[in-house]
Amino acid sequence: MKRSTGQDRSITAKWRPATQAVRAGTWRSEQGETSEALFLNSGFTYDSAEQVAARFQGEEPGPVYSRFQNPTTAMLEERIAMMEGAEACRSQASGMAAMTTALLCQLSAGDHIVAGRAAFGSCRWIVDNLLPRFGIEKTIVDARDVDAWEAAIRPNTKVFFFETPANPTMDIVDLTAVCGLAKSRGITTVVDNAFATAALQRPIEFGADVVAYSATKLMDGQGRVLLGAVCGTAEFINDVLMPFQRNTGPIAAPFNAWVVLKGLETLQLRAEKQSENAMVLARFLEERGVKMLHPGLESHPQHEIAKRQMDAFGNIFSFDLAGRAEAFAMLNAFELIDISNNIGDAKSLACHPASTTHNNMGPEGRAEAGVGEGMIRMNVGLEDVQDLLEDLDRGLKAVGL
Ligand SMILES: Cc1ncc(COP(=O)(O)O)c(C=O)c1O
């Protein structure tokens, strides 16, 4: 192996986040490649029978099988852990694989979970439909209300699970208050940080135990691959998550991990610039009388909390039009902004959550989660902001605004 400081935590821990995003986790093969190598292999060979035995018994470091870990996924995991301020991280095949793994690895029949009401549709599906099938009880709360979290605690409560900002209502959860409450009652917090990423918000600094990701979003940043990650203490990752992951197999593909490794190198720049573009568009829409849901706007009820825990407010926001017909008319009028249910992309995208990402919640579930029929969710990209403003203006005119 060639010299690389990327694996040496006594060095990488001193680096600032933007440096970690480019270099942490990197190690080099004997070829001395500059860019991280893509190890597209499932198995490994050994110098001796003793060596493989030592690896399987955890007495010697090194790969044994790519369902457990692969040199490329290992580089990504170390990089994400460093950026997050976590002791360890493991990558998964998608964001939903990460959420499922983060919850199922620690919950058993008879346990109780409390989860935020506003959440990505599939995250709610896991809590509402999957966990109860295995005897795991649930309570859904308005995640903005700290008293509601406290009131929901039962003797068997094991996990608090929420997103902040939440998809697509942009609810903000007070990380310090909710994670502090959980800690004082011996409950593990699992925070879905997909909207902000470590470039803009590091929940562990505010007391979170586990941070779970859809890296498909801003971390990849160019709409190429699906990937997920779970970060936490070394004890949680090695002793709780890994037995589940290595035996059930939701591991990330090395190619996808490599794509996200390269995506992370530009994450800070993209997150900052896209957040800046999003603020310009959000202010423009608000001035035109549109009801905005953006934590960076003073009109957002939790703007002050967002300012405390986020470095910038992210590239995603939502807004409410009169109804589904108006939302569809606006989406259909865009020339530049694509109609797409993905987020985090460098291309600006817009979607109608009620008929797409949150369709499976049903009308009652959506009403409870605050996902209105006239809601549009915008992913603001890296295009010239002037072109985006002109496209939004086109959309507003199509609905008479
Ligand atoms: C907040 C949030 N969590 C999780 C996911 C799931 O991620 P993936 O599509 O990578 O499975 C999404 C996807 O849209 C999301 O928005």
Image: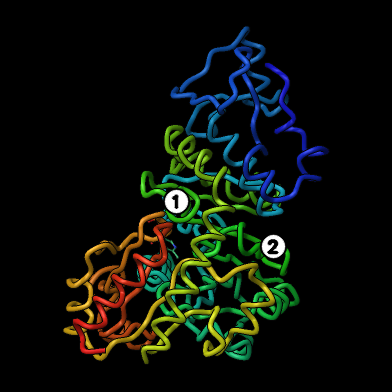
Q: Secondary structure at mark 2?
A: helix
Q: Secondary structure at mark 1?
A: loop
Residue drawn at x 31%, y 71% as measured from the top left: 390
- Answer yes or no: disc 2 within 8 Å of ligand 1: no
* Residue holding disc 1: 221
Of residues 335 and 53, which is closer to you in this image?
Answer: 335
Q: Percent x, y for residue 255?
A: 42, 33
Q: Which amino acid, by three-letter code, is at mark 2?
A: Ile
Of residues 143 and 187, which is closer to you in this image?
Answer: 143
Q: Quadrant of residue 160?
A: bottom right
Q: What's the colour scheme?
A: rainbow
Residue drawn at x 54%, y 72% as measured from the top left: 164
Q: Percent x, y for residue 226?
A: 39, 47
Residue drawn at x 24%, y 76% as measured from the top left: 394
Cα distance in 3D space between marks 1 and 2? 23 Å
The image shows residue 185, relative to residue 59, as above or below, that is below
* Residue holding disc 2: 204
Q: Is residue 70 visible?
A: yes
Q: Percent x, y for residue 349?
A: 32, 63
Q: Which amino acid, by three-letter code, is at mark 1?
A: Gly
Q: Write down which quadrant ligand 1 falls in.
A: bottom left
Of residues 32 and 1, which is closer to you in this image?
Answer: 32
Earlier-in-chain disc, 1 versus 2: 2
In the rendered image, the quadrant that contains the N terminus is top right
In this picture, residue 395 sits left or right of residue 272: left
